[in-house]
Image (cartoon, rainbow, N blue to C red):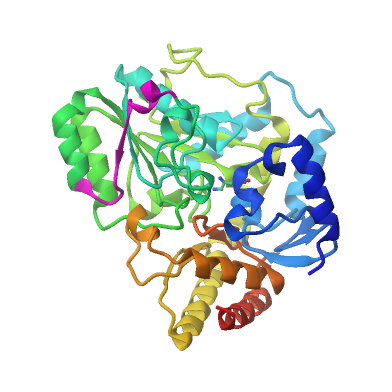
Amino acid sequence: MKRDLSDKLFQAAKKTIPGGVNSPVRAFKNVDGEPFFVRRAKGCKIEDVDGNQMIDYVGTWGPAILGHAPECVLEAVASAAKDGVSFGIPNPYEVEMAGLIVDWVPSVEKVRMVNSGTEATMSAVRLARGYTGRNKVVKFEGCYHGHVDSLLVAAGSGALTHGEPDSAGVPSAFAAETIILPYNDLEKVRAVFSEMGDQIAAVIVESYPANAGLIFPKEGYLQGLRDVTAQYGSVFIFDEVMTGFRVARGGVQELEGITPDLTAMGKVIGGGLPVGAFGGKAEIMNYLAPDGPVYQAGTLSGNPLAMAAGLAQLREMDRLGGYCMLEKMGARLEVGVREILAAKGLEYQFNRVGSMFCLFFTNEEIVNLDSVMTADTVVFRKFFTAMLEQGVYMAPSPYETGFISVAHGDSEIDTTLEAVDAALVKI
Ligand code: HOZ
């Protein structure tokens, strides 16, 4: 594949942008490559500046659930833009969006819009601290909650990809307020609570961890977290930035029947524009300024274009019965991948929920970060490269989740499976 223009852009970008990218995982370092630059994207395909077309399983890291540039979103944005692109004063779209979120997400009684998933988790943690008057927060190894200081410890996603799960620049005093525990080990959580439960403001967990590959909770684990936090008066924060409005209308909490106190959201609700949100019990949310003492603010929060795009995308998902369509395509991909890998006799784990999936080259069951780290990264790199050469773009890191969109049809899934078959020959 020719990438001349991309290569030129990357050289130019490196002069003015740190590492040439605006988010580290995009640098392709973990796959010994260099990024391509996208000129346009439509449906399930992206086209780079050199004219190469690829079937895309990154979907702008989750938001593109209808595929890229769906007509309903383009129309909603164009129509909203005619009336102004930002007001910095309340607008009707925000009220509609809040109503929809409260309606769809079982535990959310009130919601505040922000501009990214990072802002959502950061604000939820501050709110939990303000509400409880406590400082400590429990998080789990490999869970990634954006680049929030106190949560950027033992983190996943780009931090893990680049081998630095603990970031420089995070004061050790901040990190000391974060208690890190292995995922899926309820006994350790109970032990920490029995020792210092009255100091713990919150437990934050990715509903299904999706930034160290894709990990599922053991039976009873999430309910166990719910119970222990309730027992000690700590706030239970569900990070559904990846899974919210993606695995079901109401996210993992709907699938698993769990009622967190606060939920962090983002990605799909913005229809591809920058958005995040956090919401939950009214009693806790009422601690936010201007009604309460916990300050949180944002010039672009509730931006009319982002709200219009998100509303259009969510309503279209509903109209199409999008979650059923995604399950069907996800199952087709999973069955095909499993058949191919079994025939090749390769050791692997394939984790999937609806349209989210991750392939690990290991024989170990994936239950926590330690098991994720047993996956063969050399094989992954070869696999990624061979897929890309055949026009199939997977996330450029073994620690990211793949996404299918409603725009992926049978023929794209079949083309992908042919590529998987051919790629594995090269491994
Ligand atoms: N941390 C994001 C994926 N989990 C990557 C965001 C990006 O590079 O755009």
Q: Nearer the viewer, residue 352 or 230?
A: 352
Residue 242 visible: yes
Q: Nearer the viewer, residue 309 or 351?
A: 351
**Was residue 144 drawn as part of the magenta stretch in this picture?**
no
| Residue 324 locus on image (x, y percent) | 53, 65
Side of 325 where 338 appears, left or right: left
Please state the total of marks drawn on the protein image. Answer: 0
Residue at the spot x=70%, y=74% of the render?
390
| Residue 170 locus on image (x, y percent) | 46, 27
Please state, as top left, top right, bottom left or bottom right, where the N terminus lies in the image. bottom right
In which quadrant of the rendered view does residue 304 lie?
top right
Is residue 397 placed above or below 305 in the rendered structure?
Answer: below
Please state, as top left, top right, bottom left or bottom right, where the C terminus lies in the image. bottom right
| Residue 422 locus on image (x, y percent) | 62, 82
Is residue 37 placed above or below 172 in the rendered structure?
Answer: below
**Was residue 181 drawn as part of the magenta stretch in this picture?**
yes
Q: Give the magenta range.
A: 171-186
